[in-house]
Image: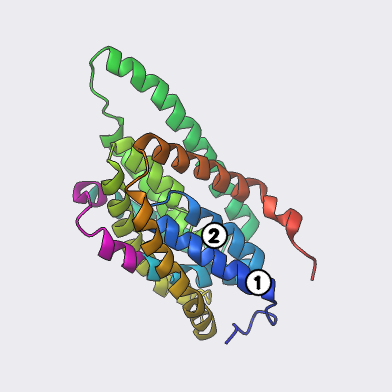
Amino acid sequence: MIPQSMPVMENWQWALGWLGALFIGLGKGGLPGLGNLTIALYALAFPSRASVGILLLVLICADFVAITIYRRHVHWPSLGKLIPWAVVGMLIGYFALGQIDNDGVRRLIGFILLGMTGVHFYRRHQLAKVRMENSEDTLPHALWFVASMGIIGGFATMTANGAGPVAALYLLAVGLPKMAFIGTTAWFFVAMNLFKVPFHVDLGIITRDSLLLSLSFAPVAAIGVVMARMVVRFINQRIFEALVWFFIVVAGSELLFNISMVFRTQP
């Protein structure tokens, strides 16, 4: 059953929906960044406001599969620091959704993601100096850094399901190894995504019909999580982090410049 606000779907829309669901699963299962591309795919396939609600419920399905697989790989102290600030960001995002136009929110998040990427690579340069001087890197544990990452991530996830790159920035800065990074990310998003549901229902973004459409994509996302688990253990840590940042730039560029608009067809 198709949401009432949507026209009858064509085959290419179903194809993008299923492909995006597979990318969600692969991303949740530990292949970095692929889930971020689904934001663009769903924005292409569905009306932008409806796409946020449809995507959220597919994400939640993949989240539960991911935390089942990676339940032993989680760094609770990092979650404890980040989640309270993320809740603040989500509340800000909830009110912003009623005030800011969708394109404005997308551009704001894209700007933030690309800006944070620049900060990350600047920090890598600075960290090289820190190691040479045998001094301690305190930034990942600084209150302002944790607070800003949490608030920005909460805002991004509430408005566009787009907090993956922000969470990656924080958790990579903390220095978590690959498996702990995946497990901690999975637990962070299962908490955040469940928290968002009543707010999206209140805004009319999630409806009974959009729920039914999400359920048609959810099994593909679950399969993607299991597929990723089979190969993630063989990925080199350096390649893993490089892929994370590559897809952060891709996602941030799409949100800021709305590149996918080139491929949209006029109604």
Which one is nearer the viewer's eye here, 193 or 23? 23
Instruction: Please rate how many residues cluster around mark 1, counting C-alpha atoms within 10 Å: few if below 14, some from 14 to 19, many from 20.
Output: some
Give the residue pinned by disc 1.
13
Type of amino acid at the residue the image marks with label 1: Gln
Task: Tell me what residue is drawn at x 29 percent, y 13 percent.
Answer: 132
Q: Residue at x 35, y 18 (%)?
A: 128
User: Can residue 11 be seen at all in this image of the molecule?
Assistant: yes
Q: Which residues are magenta?
A: 63-79
**18 displayed left or right of 192:** right
Relative image position of residue 117 (x, y in whole percent): 48, 36
Dot 2 falls on a residue whose secondary structure is: helix
Which residue is painted at 34% across and 22% down in the image?
127
> Going by the image, does 247 lie left or right of 148?
right
Furthest residue toward right: 266
Occupied quadrant, residue 265: bottom right
Q: Is residue 101 visible?
A: no
Q: Quadrant of the C terminus?
A: bottom right
Q: CA distance from mark 1 to mark 2?
A: 13 Å
Q: Secondary structure at mark 1?
A: helix
Left/right placement of residue 219 relative to residue 51 reads left
User: How many residues crowd around disc 2 within 10 Å: few (fewer than 14), some, or many (20 or more)?
Assistant: many
| Residue 73 drawn in magenta | yes
Residue 224 in the image: state x and y as whole percent. 43, 64
Asked whether, in this view, residue 208 is left or right of residue 241, the answer is right
Residue of label 2: 38
Mark 1 vs 2: CB contact within 8 A: no
Residue 122 within the magenta-colored segment of the rendering: no
220 is higher (above) or lower (below) than 66: below
- Residue 193 in percent (x, y) is at 38, 65
Looking at numbered disc 2 in the image, what kind of residue is underneath it? Thr
